[in-house]
Image (spheres, rainbow, N blue to C red):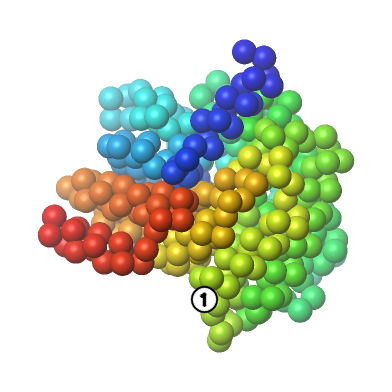
Amino acid sequence: MDSRDLLQATVDLLVQPGKGILAADESGPTIAKRFKAVGVESTDENRRAYRHLLLATPGLSAYISGVILYEETLMQRADDSSPLPELATRQGLVPGIKVDAGKIPLALAPGDEITQGLDGLAKRLAAYKEHGARFAKWRAVYNVSDTLPSRLAIEANADALARYAAICQEEAVVPIVEPEVLMDGGHTLERCAEATEAVLHEVFDALHRHRVVLEHMLLKPSMVVAGKAQARQALATEVAAQTVRVLRRRVPAAVPGIFFLSGGQTPAEASAHLDAMNRLGPHPWALSFSFGRALQDPVLHAWQGQAANTRSAQEALLERARLNSAAREGRYDPTMEGVSARTSARA
Ligand code: 13P
């Protein structure tokens, strides 16, 4: 298969009706934080066991098309000693890989951050491909205040995202471009909309300058929501209207899919927001999910590091995936949460 056909085939596998992506690519410090919240120590074996649990969930591919892994997981093995990416593929999940090296303060720009990891990226991608990765992810983050993100941060991060995406496409790996406008702070929904629009405008300008083929990438944005410390939290219909308005203004119709991050929303909020957006369709792009916390929080709470809890943890993942699959089609209802809670209480 030539490189263009491979990119298209990967996009077609990832963007399927009723399916989203599971983000399970937490870095060492982040997974340690998530484990600590449920009293689990972050050892190599605990991380392996947990990621194995996620990938081995029976029936997950009915709702999940791909899974984003951290480099460590790509190299780890399943209980039957086959590599974990092979287990994912056997389960009908396309393996992907987080390739950025995290964020640092942007020099001479107080409050802004920049994502690093471009040096040697082409070589690393070639190695990740050998281990089965077919798509990649790079996350840029933007802090919001009255003055942040600065023009400098918007431009520098857009350029890094576009260079990353171009390198991926040259290696026949589908890039997920993730500009995350953070929920931290007291900003309003309107301020988030303004910042998100400026960020997306610059990202697509940079993607164009770097010759990235829009048909062969996916966008993973944050939703337009008020800051966590903002007293007035918007209704799901307001979040949906503002998010869709910004996307329609700034994301070309050639982009096949927009897979949202959850960014600190509760699982039910993230599902309700995604559902409300899909009810405003039809849209030129698929609107789906690539949640980390909003898929995994109930799983971690059910698991608690105990092998005996594996089954209930997998059921929690399957349930969350099913609810988000419904939201991806505009068929979610908050009352479905009640039904699932009652069902799992009975189980
Ligand atoms: P959250 O959905 O928890 O924001 O994680 C998604 C992700 O991949 C962040 O980079």
- Dot 1 corresponds to which residue? 235
Q: Is mark 1 within 8 Å of ligand 1?
A: no
The answer to which quarter of the image holds residue 295 is bottom left
Is 34 situated above or below 132? below
Is 148 situated above or below 199? below
Is 162 situated above or below 36? above
Which x, y percent locates residue 140?
68, 53
Left or right position of 141 against 204: left
Residue ID at (63%, 40%): 256
Instruction: Residue at the far top: name it.
Output: 1
- Say whether residue 17 is visible: yes
Instruction: Residue at the far left: name it.
Output: 346
Quarter of the image with the N terminus is top right
Residue ID at (77%, 35%): 212
Crowd tier of the residue under label 1, counting other residues whose Cα lies within 10 Å: few below 14, some 14–19, many 20 or above:
some
Mark 1 secondary-structure assignment: loop
Quarter of the image with the C terminus is bottom left
Which x, y percent locates residue 327?
44, 55
Q: Which of 260 and 71 is in front in this view?
A: 260
Residue ID at (82%, 67%): 150
The answer to which quarter of the image holds residue 333 is bottom left
Q: Which of 150 and 268 is in front in this view?
A: 268
Give the residue type that dot 1 points to: Leu
Which x, y percent locates residue 172?
66, 24
- Say whether residue 74 is visible: no
Q: Nearer the viewer, residue 347 or 282?
A: 282
